[in-house]
Image (tube, rainbow, N blue to C red):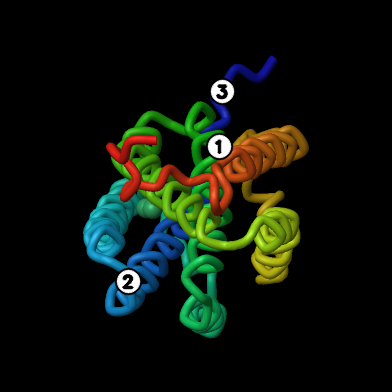
Amino acid sequence: MNTEPVSNSSDYRQSMGQLLMLYTQVDRLIMEICAERLTQAPDEDAELSLAKQVGDESRHVSIQRQWMRDFGTQPMPVITPEQEQMIRAHFRTLPWIDFLADLYICVEALGSEAVERIVPLADPGTRESLRVPLTDEIDHVAFGVARLKQELGKISETERQAFIERLPVRIEALTDTFHGFGFSVRDLFEAVGADYVRLCRMLEERQKELIAELAAAPAAGHQPVREMAGVPA
Ligand SMILES: [Fe+2]
Ligand SMILES: [Fe+2]
């Protein structure tokens, strides 16, 4: 019986190296996308959160780069410069509400869920390198979900329902683009010991959970009206 841990195999090291590179590239892109959005933030709260996130993602990129050097693999970029350009262009054109859905529900929430699932399978060094980034991602997702709820509270009930119903299609479109980038996400995950089918099922569950949370947020007209507080009935 082979008792050698998966994390000692060369296949594991190569694939984990590539996954680390992918995570670093995505974090770098998020940093750039949030920095660009900063100038069009709808209010100061959003401005401050985006600015904090730019700093967080920059820290994640340097933690991951340092770890990739120590890990010893020299992975090539997984996403090409043209694909990176396409991703930046996509986010640049999005209205605020769509920006929140794509960046925070799809990339941040579902992306970090996938990374979380890898943590228990990873070698101790990789696990440690993901500790700070994954803790910060919780903050980013919380901001995105809260602001998305706020935007959904401003539109009519019909628009709100339509937006929520369209969310799975938005997520699928982004996922399809990602899967069309020319590398096999499935192979990378399986090489580090993940059960890919199970992982996809978990991501679907998380997606449902997030959508249910957004759907449960109070609709327009049901928001507590602050101006009326204290006004006798
Ligand atoms: Fe990050
Ligand atoms: Fe993040």
User: Is the residue marked by circle 2 packed among few (<14), some (14-19), or many (20+) residues within 10 Å?
Assistant: some
Q: Which residue is mark 2?
A: 41
Q: Earlier in the sequence, mark 2 or mark 1?
A: 1
Residues at marks 1 and 3, CA–CA distance in whole angstroms = 8 Å
Residue 27 sits in quarter: bottom left
Q: Which of 126/102 is in front?
A: 102
**How many discs mark residues in the rendered view?**
3
- Mark number, residue 4: 3
Q: Is residue 30 above or below residue 66?
A: below
Question: Extreme front residue here?
Answer: 233
Q: CA distance from mark 2 to mark 3?
A: 51 Å
Name the one closer to the observer, 157 or 17. 157
Whether residue 84 sits left or right of residue 63 in the image: it is right
Which label was assigned to residue 9?
Answer: 1
* Residue 41 visible in the snapshot: yes
Q: Earlier in the sequence, mark 1 or mark 3?
A: 3
Task: Name which residue lies at 52% across and 47% down.
Answer: 109
Secondary structure beneath dot 3 equals loop
Give the residue type that dot 2 points to.
Ala
2 or 3: mark nearer the eye: 2
Label 1 with label 3: CB-CB less than 8 Å? yes
